Image (cartoon, helix red, strand yellow):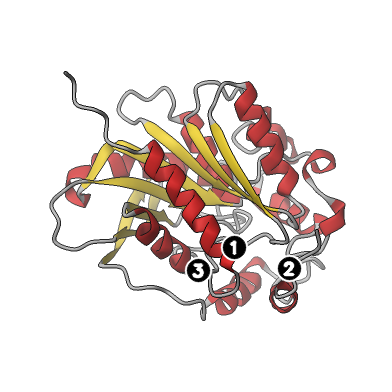
Amino acid sequence: MSLHPTAAQLVAEMNAARPADRQRSVGEVRAVLAKLLADVSRPEVAYVADLTLPVDGGTIPARLYRPERGSTRPLPLIVYFHGGGWLLGSVDTHDPITRRLALATGMAVLSVGYRRGPEARFPTAVDDAVAAVRWAVAQADDFGVDPARLAVAGDSAGGNLATVAAALLSGDTAVRVRHQLLIYPVTTYDMERGFDDRYEDVVLSRDEMLWFRGNYLATPQQAGDPRFSPLGADLRGLPSATVVLAECDPIRPQGTLYVEALRRAGVTARVREYPGMLHGFFGLDTFWDEGRDAMEFAAGGLVEALRPNPEPA
């Protein structure tokens, strides 16, 4: 299957933001990406609040979405981590996705603006992700959410942070993550296994992946750390997963391999790969019907996993 015909123009525009030649600074690429995504439609959500989340050594931004106003019933909570190679992206760039996710699921969504490289090197983003989940659970009453119905979610590098946070929290008696939504996640440093050369330069390239890694990790030796490459970790005991993949995404193999590893570890994982789609398509329903379908698939997995526990007899 070849790339969806309507994707060509979008790919051309996104390529303008890419640092493949490594000549642009991270700040310049952030600005280009923010401009590129600024015109994506943002549906109305009943309640949206910008928050400041405390972390070790400072604070980070967060944004809370509730799809209904005035209700007193506690909602399930999705803690969402944006993509962008641990360097790019923000609560603002991913606002269209997190709004759509709140509306599609009927759940509260907390979008987390973790600290990024190169200003904050690995494992700062991981530490922020774990801290954000713990903080959200501690604020459950104030947010009107049910801490027993908790999921983590993210796209690309954010999917990496989501599954790593779920693993690190698996032994925490105060926090129980029940599900993980992983959208074309980064799961391994091994580009021989985790990169499909047929789709080189379709949004992502090998050089770009190395550029992300070089600006995120403090040392090259950290590439094998399971907090960076969860594909090599012990995945037993992780929460169930819903995984969204795009056929024409050069890092699609990382998601495919991770689903296989989760299943070998006894973790329930449902996956859907979208023919002709590219990295970044999720939630872009103004471009493709597949973006809407993927959001509905993701929402279905979350709704099923976060059903209320039955009352004891």
**Tally of numbered tags:** 3
In the rendered structure, which disc, 3 or 1, sits on the residue that comes first in sequence?
Answer: 3
In the rendered structure, which disc, 2 or 3, sits on the residue that comes first in sequence?
Answer: 2
Q: Nearer the viewer, mark 2 or mark 3?
A: 2
- Look at the numbered discs 1 and 2 and tell me whether their residues touch, using CB distance below 8 Å: yes
Taking the spot 50% from the left edge, 68% from the top edge, the residue there is: 93
**Residue 62 in sight in this render:** no
Q: Which residue is mark 3?
A: 93
Q: CA distance from mark 3 to mark 1?
A: 20 Å
Task: Please state, as top left, top right, bottom left or bottom right, where the N terminus lies in the image.
Answer: bottom right
Q: Which residue is mark 2?
A: 4
Q: Position of residue 132 (x, y in %)?
A: 38, 45
- Tell me: residue 226, above or below residue 34: above
Q: Position of residue 301 (x, y in %)?
A: 46, 43
Q: CA distance from mark 1 to mark 2?
A: 10 Å
Q: Position of residue 289 (x, y in %)?
A: 57, 67
Q: Which residue is mark 1?
A: 290
In the rendered structure, which disc, 1 or 2, sits on the residue that comes first in sequence?
Answer: 2
- Tell me: residue 271, above or below residue 62: above
Q: Nearer the viewer, mark 3 or mark 1?
A: 1
**Residue 38 in sight in this render:** yes
